[in-house]
Every structure is written in C-alpha cells, then in structure tokens.
Image (cartoon, rainbow, N blue to C red):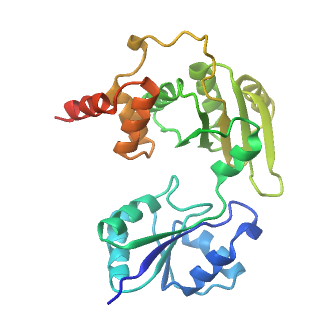
Amino acid sequence: MQAGKLYLCATPIGNLEDMTYRAVRLLKEAALIAAEDTRHTRKLLTHFDIHTPLTSYHEHIKDTRGPELIERLLNGEDVAVVSDAGLPGISDPGSHLVRLALDAGLTVVPVPGANAALTALVAAGLDTTAFTFAGFLPKTGKKRRAFIRALADYQTTLVLYESPHRLKATLAELLDELGDRPAVAARELTKKFEEFIRGTLKSLQQHFSENQPRGEFTLVINGNDNENAEPLADAELPPLEQAVAALVSAGYDKKTAIREVAASRAVPRREVYQAVIGKEL
C-alpha cells in the first residue's frame, strides 16, 4: 500500500483572497484536515465550499493525536494540516507532526501562502538581506529576559510576534535590552485596518502609551549595526547553555538554538554543544 502525504497548507492571515487555488484544491482532495482550532477553520472551509472531514490538532493533544494521524498516513490517506492563520509549523504544533512524519519515512509537502512575519518584513522598510525570526517571546520573566539578551547582538533584522495585551511591556523590555533602534509595529496584516507604525522602539513605546494596542502584532526591529558600540562583557551575558535553553523554550529545536547562539557569540558550535551537553549530564 502506498503511504499518504502530509500537506502543510497555508491559510489567510486576514484577507480570504490570499488563499491559493492549490491550497483549496488539496483541502478538498485530502482524506482529513487537521486544524489548530476546528471552529475557526470550519468558517474558512464553509467559505470555500470544502467538505473534507475535520479533526483537532493543537498543542495540548499533539502527543496523542499526532501518532493517530501518522497511522492514517501510513494507511494511505492524505492529511492536510492548517493553522489558524498563515503557514502551519510556524509557532504552532505543526512542526511536531512534521518530525513524526519524517521519522516514519513519510512525504511532507509544503503548500506556501500567506505568512505574517514575511508580510511585515517586506513592507517594514528595514534591511531584508538577512533576518532572524524569533516567534513569540517566552512568557516567564527570567526566560524572557535571557531570550531578549541573547538577541541583543544579532546583526540581522529581528522579527517577532506579540499579542496586544503584552505589547507595551514587550516594547519596554526590548528598549531596555536592545537600546533604541529603528523598529516597525505591523498590526492587522491584510485586514481592513492594516497599519504599519514606523519609527524606533522608543517612539513605538510612546505611540502605544497614547493609543491602546489592538489586533495581533508583528514587530520588525533593526539588527545591531552599531560598529562602534562597546560589546557586552562576557560576565554580563547569560551562560551559553542558558542562552540555548531560552531559545528552546521559545520554540527552537536544540540544534537550531545551538547554531544561533554560536553565531551570535562568535564561538564554535562545538563549544556551545559541549556547554549544553555538560549541563545535561
């Protein structure tokens, strides 16, 4: 029996016209659609007249539902995965299912489309030559602070997500750790009230002290391009293993976290790897 394929189908981040013809076709042809929020996705399916069976697949059930989906794939059924908005696998449990599928020798097919991070980046007006996607910051204070400190030396443009009720606190923390630098807050991307607030971290903080944040935000922040800035002393930086742990807690896999920390500290990956492994032993 030929195994099925796992399709990662991008969905609109706001404007339904951003749905691709290919994604609509594959969602209709799949045996099953695994959705982060079935109520939200059902509205999308109704709009495009898609009647494929729907099942939940989110963070709290991924460990049990994931193997069930793999079994269906192994039995020859095609499964499509969608998130609430944008590409599945970006800051959501879709990445967990991809790893399960690859471990089982299955074929994973990306079906590209809208993505909030790239949509904000290309219109922000900051450098797009290289960028670092940081996703959502850790929620707890200690991990959060260490994560932001780890980003301070990155020379690439930074892109991250934030909710409206945490935006003010986040801007204050970013300003404190990164210093004032060019930044853009993009909200309600592709929707009726889409808005780009351009300036610096300090001016954004001032803007949102006077205007209540509304909608989901993507922040785009200039990298550390101050060649004359004094580098932080080693004693001021979190230990290598803590920097890696902060990135892992934010959703990076360990290998990627080690690579990012090595690049930001300008040290060999092996040195970071040995620091992490030594701490785990």
Placement of 214 over or under 275, stated as above or below: below
- The image shows residue 202, relative to residue 247, as above or below, that is above
Q: Nearer the viewer, residue 149 or 265?
A: 265
Q: Where's residue 40, x and y in %?
A: 62, 69
Residue at the image position 48 percent from the left and 27 percent from the top: 145
Split into 4 quadrants, where in the image is the N terminus?
A: bottom left
Label tally? 0
The answer to whether residue 58 is visible is yes
Q: Residue at x 72, y 23 (%)?
A: 202
Q: Nearer the viewer, residue 177 or 165?
A: 177
Q: Is residue 164 visible?
A: no
Q: Position of residue 93 (x, y in %)?
A: 45, 59
Quarter of the image with the C terminus in it: top left
Residue at 30% across, 70% down: 104
Q: Position of residue 56 (x, y in %)?
A: 47, 72
Residue 269 shown left or right of residue 28 in the figure: left
Residue 224 is situated, as x and y percent measured from the top left of the image, at: 60, 23
Q: Work out which residue is located at the far right of the displayed protein and give it.
A: 192
Task: Tell me which corner region of the image, top left, top right, bottom left or bottom right, holds residue 192.
Answer: bottom right
Q: Quadrant of residue 114?
A: bottom right
What residue is rendered at 75% in x and 51% in y?
188
127 vs 243, nearest the viewer: 127
Q: Residue furthest bottom?
A: 1
